[in-house]
Amino acid sequence: MSDNAAALAHFAARLAFETDVSDVAADMAAGVPGVVVVDSRSRESWDQGHIEGAVHLPTAEIAARAPGLVPREATVVTYCWGPGCNGATRAALEFAKLGYRVREMIGGFEYWAREGFPVETASGVTRRPVDALTAPVSGIACAC
């Protein structure tokens, strides 16, 4: 395989199996049917804050609990803490083993919160100010 063919295959595969926080937020806001966002972190992490509307399913519990929680026809989007953590990758692998369509949300919960999307805690739903190092403060998409 030539270097160019390998690069094309690599980047096409990444786009097929990864998504970013802005795209997930847009899908959730639009009510795209069949998308199930899964937080694969611990209970303590979930309680600290999570994506509003996400399902809490720690990676170690996916094989046993996913079939009862997540419809087989769903497109699952996994997330964990952030880019320094591969927990979402491990969770995506578990869903793939079960035969689900799955994508990993790059940036994880960290970038979700840093880009100002809704965060749910026991106190309710909040939004943090947009971090100018992660997204345009104007709220207009980066158009990348």
Image (cartoon, rainbow, N blue to C red):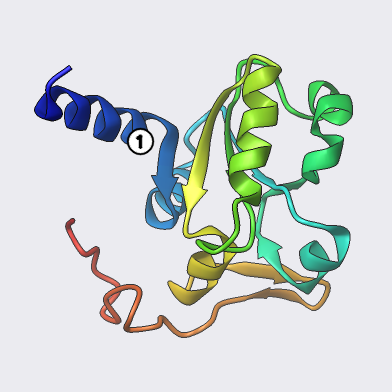
Give the total number of marks visible in the rendering. 1
| Residue type (three-letter) at the residue carrying disc 1 | Arg
* Quarter of the N terminus within the rendering: top left
Which residue is depicted at the point 44% across and 43% down?
27
Describe residue 118's horizontal placement relative to residue 25 as left or right.
right
Describe residue 13's horizontal placement relative to residue 41 as left or right.
left
* Quarter of the C terminus within the rendering: bottom left
Describe residue 116's horizontal placement relative to residue 3 as left or right.
right
Q: Which sits in the foreground, 111 or 55?
A: 111
Looking at the picture, how far across and down is residue 77, in whole percent?
Answer: 56, 39
Residue 67 higher or lower than 121, as above or below: above
Describe residue 53's horizontal placement relative to residue 111 as left or right.
right
Q: Secondary structure at mark 1?
A: helix
Residue receiving disc 1: 14
For label 1, count other residues whose C-alpha is less than 10 Å away and answer few (under 14), some (14-19) or many (20+): few
Q: Which sits in the foreground, 11 or 36?
A: 11
Residue 23 higher or lower than 8, as above or below: below
Looking at the picture, how far across and down is residue 61, in whole percent?
Answer: 86, 37
Quarter of the image for residue 21 reads bottom left
Which residue is depicted at the point 19% across and 32% down?
7
Which residue is depicted at the point 25% across and 24% down?
9
Which residue is depicted at the point 89% across and 26% down?
64
Looking at the picture, how far across and down is residue 111, in whole percent?
Answer: 48, 67
